[in-house]
Structure formats: structure tokens, C-alpha cells
């Protein structure tokens, strides 16, 4: 066996170190990059989940609006509005938050729950059908638009009115509320005279 000179041993050792570094360094760099990408991916995923949760919570507010209005639960209805919330629609405009909205709706619509004292359907009851939700969330603020149709036994069979809502919402104490809700009536039922003329 030949003895390697010190210089040859040095060159061999150096070559082995370079070879190991050539294998290890890219691997370490790749792991660091994957770690950064994983962190970015987890952060992006968490943000997406939060956005989806916000959209679902806002959807629930939009649905609760129709349900509380139809039930004439004006306390529950007005609680859907922010402390400085406003409502605007065919009956007028009200600003000033939940209490002002409660007073406004109670005075304009009054009772009229779906069932009377005997349990029979109330002819003055209403039923809102909500659809086509489009919700955009930006932090603690959001905008929403949706469609509605309205039926009432008092006005005869079929859809009586149809329109859209344009909303701004705000997160107050962790809960989504209407900052403003505008109700637009796009379609009305034909008048009795027009119906009888046919």
C-alpha cells in the first residue's frame, strides 16, 4: 500500500469536503425555501379561512334580516344594525342605530306575525325569499348585494314585490352588523285594475 503524501491527503480531504458541501448546501437551501413557502402557504390558508368565515357570518346576517322582519321580531331585527346603522327603502329612511330602526319599523309595520292567536296563517304576514348574495370583505368592513322577493297572502297569490339590497357592513365587537342597508324595489305586482283588465 502506498502512502499518500500529505499534499495528496489534503487534496482528497478538500475534495470530500467540497463534495459534501455540494450535496448539503443545496439541500439546506431547499429546506429553507420550502419552510418559507410552507409559512407563506399557512398564512395564506389562514387568511382564506378567515375570509370564508366572514362571508358565512355575513350571509347569516342577510338571512336573519328576512326572518326577523317576517316574524315581526323588531328587537332581533334592529339588533342586526350597527350602533350608527341606517335603513332606507320604500317606507322612507331611518338613521341612528338599533333603537331608531326598532321604533321606525314598529310604527310603520307593527305586528303581523305569520300566525294569529288561533294558529291560523295571518293574512298580513309576509315572507321574504333572499338570493344571489355577493359579499366582499375588507378587514372589518364589507359590502354585500342580494336579491329579494316578497309574498303576502293579503295581496293575493304569487310574488308581490322583488328587488335588491345594497349593504355596507361593519364588524362591531366581533359581530357583523349592517352599517347601512338600502332596499330597492325593482318589480311590483300588477295592480288589481291591470289584472282585471286582462
Image (cartoon, helix red, strand yellow):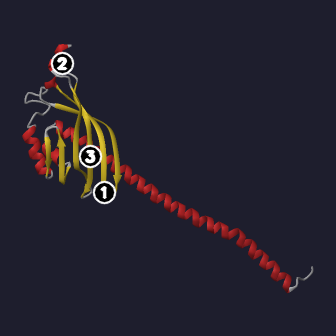
Nearer the observer, disc 2 or disc 3? Answer: 2
- Mark 2 highlights which residue? 194
- Residue at 12%, 29% in the rendered image: 124
Q: Which residue bears the numbered disc 1? A: 140
* Rendered position, 20 above or below 73: below
Q: Quadrant location of the N terminus?
A: bottom right
Q: CA distance from mark 2 to mark 1?
A: 47 Å
* Percent coordinates x, y for residue 64 in the rendering: 23, 42
Residue at mark 3: 167
Q: Residue 187: x percent and y percent?
A: 24, 30
Between 2 and 114, the one lying in front of the other is: 114
Is disc 2 placed on a helix, strand or loop? helix
SS assignment at label 3: strand
Identify the residue at the far top of this view: 198
- Contact? badges 2 and 3 (CB < 8 Å): no
Q: Measuring 18% from the left and 45% from the top, which residue is drawn there?
A: 87
Amino acid at each position: 500500500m502506498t502512502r499518500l503524501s500529505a499534499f495528496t491527503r489534503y487534496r482528497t480531504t478538500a475534495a470530500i469536503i467540497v463534495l459534501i458541501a455540494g450535496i448539503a448546501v443545496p439541500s439546506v437551501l431547499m429546506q429553507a425555501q420550502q419552510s418559507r413557502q410552507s409559512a407563506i402557504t399557512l398564512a395564506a390558508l389562514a387568511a382564506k379561512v378567515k375570509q370564508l368565515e366572514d362571508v358565512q357570518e355575513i350571509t347569516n346576517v342577510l338571512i336573519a334580516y328576512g326572518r326577523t322582519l317576517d316574524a315581526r321580531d323588531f328587537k332581533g331585527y334592529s339588533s342586526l344594525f350597527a350602533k350608527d346603522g341606517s335603513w332606507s327603502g320604500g317606507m322612507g329612511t331611518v338613521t341612528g342605530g338599533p333603537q331608531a330602526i326598532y321604533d321606525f319599523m314598529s310604527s310603520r309595520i307593527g305586528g303581523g306575525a305569520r300566525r294569529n292567536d288561533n294558529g291560523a296563517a295571518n293574512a298580513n304576514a309576509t315572507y321574504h325569499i333572499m338570493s344571489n348574495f355577493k359579499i366582499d370583505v375588507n378587514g372589518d368592513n364589507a359590502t354585500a348585494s342580494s336579491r329579494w322577493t316578497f309574498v303576502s297572502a293579503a295581496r293575493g297569490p304569487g310574488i308581490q314585490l322583488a328587488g335588491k339590497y345594497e349593504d355596507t357592513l361593519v364588524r362591531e365587537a366581533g359581530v357583523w352588523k349592517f352599517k347601512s342597508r338600502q332596499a330597492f324595489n325593482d318589480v311590483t305586482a300588477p295592480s288589481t285594475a291591470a289584472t282585471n283588465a286582462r
